[in-house]
Image: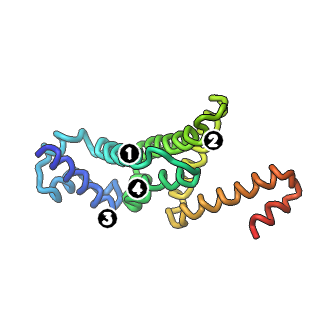
Amino acid sequence: MQNFTKKAIKETFVTLLDQRPLNRITVKDIVETCGINRNSFYYHFEDLPALVDEIIADQVEELVSRHPTIDTLESCFDAALEFVLKNRRAILHIYNSLSRDTFERRLMEVCQYVVATYVEADFAGRPVDEADKALLIRYHKCECFGNIIDWLNSGMEDDISAYFHRIYQLKRGWEGAVLRGDASGQGMAAVQN
């Protein structure tokens, strides 16, 4: 019974959050929609921020279990985006609320996990300095986080997944041009055509 009630509270909250901003949702709204009393809500959650934190933590846990390995940087970003895209409107409401710090902290955890998972798999069995690996993880984690935050700030209007895939396509072309010693940039033009 306890798990059912807790699940119902979470599902009701996400449904309400998909309909309106977080600052317009109250515990009263949740319990009336669920058909439970306030004490039942407070038995499971200290307050609304605790509910938000647990829902986001659940999403992070689910994402981690679905992605035990990641084979490309594009897949890293796709995995991190799952965290946001699953409940796009609800996430935007959380992001534009006082719970933004909770969301950002969890998003950084997601970015850290997906990038570290990729880097560890990509460098498995190769002699790579741990400090260099840590630098790569930090750089790509911040790149992932920053781009997702920028996308949220712009209202989530662009196709962020297509953006990431194109960026990495361009990066591979640029890196190839550098490796070929084509400093003039003509290698990059050839990649783009």
**Secondary element at tag 4:** helix
Q: Residue at x 60, y 47 (%)?
A: 143
**Closer to the eye: label 3 or 2:** 2
Cα distance, mark 3 to mark 1?
28 Å
Amino acid type indicated by mark 4:
Ile
Question: Which quarter shows the C terminus?
Answer: bottom right
Amino acid type indicated by mark 1:
Ser
Residue 129, percent from left and from top: 66, 29
For label 1, the residue is 65
Q: Residue at x 80, y 55 (%)?
A: 177
**Closer to the eye: label 3 or 4:** 4
**Closer to the eye: label 2 or 4:** 2
What is the residue that sits farthest to the bottom in this orientation?
193
For label 2, the residue is 139
* Upstream in sequence: badge 2 or badge 1: 1
Amino acid type indicated by mark 3:
Gln
Can residue 118 be seen here? yes
Out of 158 and 173, give the one closest to the viewer: 173
For label 4, the residue is 91
Figure quadrant of residue 42 = top left
